C-alpha cells in the first residue's frame, strides 16, 4: 500500500481518509501515530504514518475476511463490546458501562470489559501526567466498574437462592459449593463438569486442541506483551500506541486465562471478538510479512473449516 509524500500534511486527520469502512478501533492507533511523533523530522513522520496506513489497510481486510466462525452469543458479545469500547474512547462512560453489562449477559467473559472505564478514568491519566485522580473520580470509576459485573452477580445470587437458601444446611442434597468462602455456581460447574482448573487441560490427549489455538494465541500474546514492554521502556507509539494499552492488558489477561484455566481451543471462538487480535495480525503483516502471510492463509482456511466443523458439532467445538 503506497503512501506518497504529497499526501502527508501536518493538518490531515488520517482517520477520516483511509477507508470508507474504517474500523472504529483503528482510530486510536491512527490518531496516536499521527500525533505522537511531532518532534520527528518530516521524513521520519512520513515513515510512521505510512506504516500505520499499511496496518490499517490490513486491519480492514482481516476484520472482514478472517475468523468467520462466530455464533450468535459471541456475535452479540462482540458487537456490544465494540460499541462499549467506542463509547469509552469518546468518554461516554455511563453508556459504555451499560453496554458492557449487556455483553456480560451473553457471555461470562464480558465481565473483563469492566476494565475499560476505570482505565480511562484512573490509569490512563496517571500514565500521561503522573497525577493522582481526585477521590470523586475514583468513586465514579468504581461505580462504572461495578455495572458490567451486575449480570454475573445476579446470576450467582439467583443460583445461591435456589440451591443453597432453599435447602437446609444439614440436607445431603445441599451442594458443597454453597459453603465456600465465595459460593460460585459458575466455578463449581466449570470444575465439576468441565474439569477446568489451573493447567488441568494440559494433558497429552488435549495437545492437538491446544495446538489448534496457538496460531491465534501466540501472535496475540507476543504483540500485546511487546506493547507493554515498549510502554515500560518509554518507547510506545507507532503500531503500539499508549492509547490502546487497556486493550493490551485485556488481551494478555484473557489469553493467559485461556492457556492455563480453560479448554484452550475455545480461543478460536472468543479471541476474534478482541480488536487486539486484528491489530496483532496487521502488525505481523507489516513487521514480519512472511509470517503475516502465513497467518492470513491459516486464518482463512480455519475460518472456512470451522464453519463446517462447528455447524456439525464436530471437534474442536
Image (cartoon, rainbow, N blue to C red):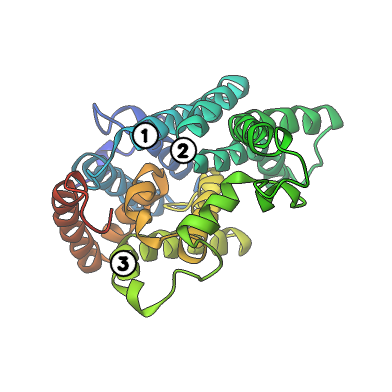
The residue carrying mark 3 is: 209
Q: Position of residue 249 (x, y in %)?
A: 56, 52
Q: Nearer the viewer, residue 115 or 285?
A: 115
Q: Nearer the viewer, residue 207 or 57?
A: 207
Q: What SS does tag 2 mark?
A: loop
The residue carrying mark 1 is: 73
Residue that appears at 35% across and 71% down: 206
Q: Position of residue 252 (x, y in %)?
A: 51, 57
Q: CA distance from mark 2 to mark 1?
A: 7 Å
Q: Position of residue 289 (x, y in %)?
A: 23, 64
Q: CA distance from mark 3 to mark 1?
A: 22 Å
Residue that appears at 25% across and 29% down: 21
Mark 3, other Cα within 10 Å: few <14 / some 14–19 / many ≥20: some
Q: CA distance from mark 2 to mark 3?
A: 22 Å
The circle drawn on residue 107 is 2
Mark 2, other Cα within 10 Å: few <14 / some 14–19 / many ≥20: some
Residue that appears at 56% across and 67% down: 198
Amino acid at each position: 500500500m503506497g503512501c506518497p509524500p504529497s499526501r502527508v500534511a501536518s493538518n490531515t486527520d488520517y482517520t477520516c481518509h483511509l477507508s470508507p469502512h474504517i474500523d472504529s478501533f483503528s482510530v486510536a492507533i491512527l490518531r496516536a501515530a499521527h500525533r505522537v511523533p511531532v518532534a520527528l523530522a518530516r521524513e521520519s513522520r512520513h515513515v510512521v504514518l505510512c506504516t500505520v496506513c499499511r496496518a490499517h489497510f490490513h486491519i480492514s481486510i482481516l476484520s472482514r475476511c478472517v475468523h468467520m466462525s462466530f455464533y450468535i452469543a459471541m456475535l452479540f458479545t462482540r458487537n456490544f463490546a465494540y460499541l462499549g469500547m467506542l463509547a469509552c474512547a469518546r468518554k461516554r462512560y455511563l453508556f459504555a458501562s451499560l453496554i458492557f453489562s449487556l455483553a456480560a449477559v451473553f457471555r461470562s467473559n464480558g465481565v473483563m470489559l469492566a476494565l475499560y472505564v476505570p482505565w480511562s478514568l484512573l490509569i490512563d491519566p496517571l500514565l500521561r501526567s503522573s497525577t493522582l485522580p481526585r477521590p470523586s473520580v475514583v468513586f465514579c470509576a468504581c461505580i462504572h466498574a461495578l455495572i458490567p459485573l451486575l449480570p454475573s452477580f445476579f446470576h450467582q445470587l439467583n443460583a445461591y437462592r435456589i440451591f443453597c437458601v432453599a435447602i437446609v444446611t444439614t440436607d445431603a442434597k445441599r451442594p458443597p459449593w454453597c459453603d465456600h468462602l465465595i459460593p460460585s455456581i459458575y466455578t463449581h460447574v466449570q470444575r465439576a463438569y468441565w474439569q477446568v482448573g489451573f493447567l488441568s487441560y494440559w494433558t497429552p490427549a488435549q495437545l492437538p486442541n491446544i495446538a489448534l489455538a496457538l496460531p491465534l494465541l501466540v501472535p496475540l500474546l507476543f504483540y500485546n506483551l511487546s506493547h507493554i514492554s515498549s510502554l515500560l521502556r518509554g518507547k510506545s507509539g507507532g503500531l503500539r500506541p499508549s492509547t490502546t494499552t487497556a486493550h493490551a492488558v485485556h488481551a494478555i489477561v484473557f489469553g493467559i486465562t485461556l492457556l492455563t484455566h480453560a479448554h484452550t481451543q475455545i480461543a478460536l471462538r472468543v479471541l476474534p471478538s478482541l480488536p487486539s487480535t486484528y491489530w496483532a495480525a496487521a502488525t505481523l503483516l507489516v513487521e514480519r510479512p512472511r509470517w503475516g502471510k502465513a497467518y492470513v492463509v491459516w486464518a482463512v482456511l480455519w475460518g472456512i473449516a470451522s464453519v463446517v466443523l462447528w455447524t456439525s458439532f464436530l471437534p474442536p467445538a
